[in-house]
Image: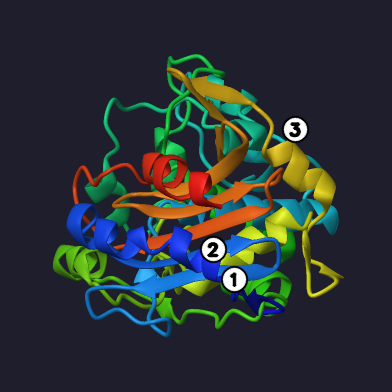
Amino acid sequence: MGLRRYSSEKMKNNLEHLKGLIERDYKNMMGICILKGNNLVYEAYFNGFTRHDTLHIASVTKSITSILVGIAIDRGFIKSVEDYVLDYFPDYHLKRGEKTIKEVKIKHLLSMTAPYKYRSEPYTKVYSSNDWTKAALDLLGGRSEIGNFKYSTVGMQILSAILVKACGQSLWKFAKENLFDPLEIMVPSSLYLENKDQHLAFLKDKKASGWVVDPKGIHTGGWGLALKTSDLLKIGKMCLDGGYYNKKRVVSKEWLCKSTQIHSRFEDKAYGYLWWLLEGGYAAIGDGGNIIYVCPAKKIVVSITSSFKPRAKDRIEFIYKDILPYL
């Protein structure tokens, strides 16, 4: 990985409080890695989890999809975020009177400003269908205006399908060749969830593995990916270093800068291209407390994996309050 274990007693003593704090207040946390510069200053695992185990990273998957879109643009597979979504689905049959969907662009999917025909996400309807992309496209558009923030997980299946169509290969193969292999990350095996029980079992599995794929063979872009805590750290380190890993370019610095600029807002929160923008940094945030946090100015990366838990305690507050002051 090209990282050194930091041996400073002062740094070690500064972070000694974390273990007890995590065991007391963040009981569903499974792993945490903290990077300062090129030094791995803290690594710990809990609840029988080890550095070799993988876990479903939930919506952290979205930020990884953002990186994959950037790589596809860098390599000319996708012309621009200004491309219209329907240009990639010429055979999609539009419903009578549907106009809004025609104006939706890739940038709207990335910034969560695409309109959808639902109030709450119809996960069951989409993920029980035999074509998740079509089911997601059927929900896109409607009477809502383009440009209003509407967080959507099912909509990310459309981005996955765009990558597949643009690159002419499976998302698994594209991600393997262009992201996972360069970062020395073992590519998760494809995982088909055949029913609701299997779906729920994957979400609750404390050592989940695989990458969920729909009946048409298109892997999920908004959830469904299981990685190790150290894998998330590698991704964060690559972002910290402007798209390079082990002196080889993975994605352009231009894309990373663009994707971590403000493109939309949700209440008081700023959003880029599938990254949450924070004071002094940015983060991939997944349900239950899965995190990739990057602070460029201080050269800090924090990766956290957590098992599923409704209303889990805020990990970003934890980072700002209990980690950054001690680094």
Q: Position of residue 132 (x, y in %)?
A: 40, 54
Q: Residue at the spot x=46%, y=72% of the render?
A: 43
Give the amino acid type for the residue marked by disc 3 in the picture: Glu
Q: Nearer the viewer, mark 2 or mark 3?
A: 2
Q: Give the distance between the C-alpha atoms of the residues marked 3 and 1, in whole angstroms.
A: 48 Å
Residue, far left: 197
Circles 2 and 1: CB atoms closer than 8 Å = yes
Q: Secondary structure at mark 3?
A: loop
- 10 Å crowding of disc 1: few (<14), some (14-19), many (20+): few
Q: Residue at the spot x=29%, y=52% of the render?
A: 288
Q: Residue at the spot x=55%, y=83% of the render?
A: 186
Seen from the viewer's position, the closer of residues 89 and 322 is 322
Q: What label does residue 56 carry, if any?
A: none
Seen from the viewer's position, the closer of residues 196 and 269 is 269
Picture quadrant of residue 10: bottom right
Residue pointed to by mark 1: 8
Q: Position of residue 63 (x, y in %)?
A: 56, 50
Give the amino acid type for the residue marked by disc 2 in the picture: Met
Q: Nearer the viewer, mark 3 or mark 1?
A: 1
Q: Is 299 on the left or on the right of 323, as rendered?
A: right
Q: Is 6 on the left or on the right of 315, as rendered?
A: right
Circles 3 and 1: CB atoms closer than 8 Å = no
Residue pointed to by mark 2: 11
Residue pointed to by mark 3: 82
- Mark 3 vs mark 1: which is more N-terminal? 1
Q: Secondary structure at mark 1?
A: loop
- 10 Å crowding of disc 3: few (<14), some (14-19), many (20+): few
Q: Position of residue 286 (x, y in %)?
A: 39, 50
- Position of 74 relative to 169 (above/below): above
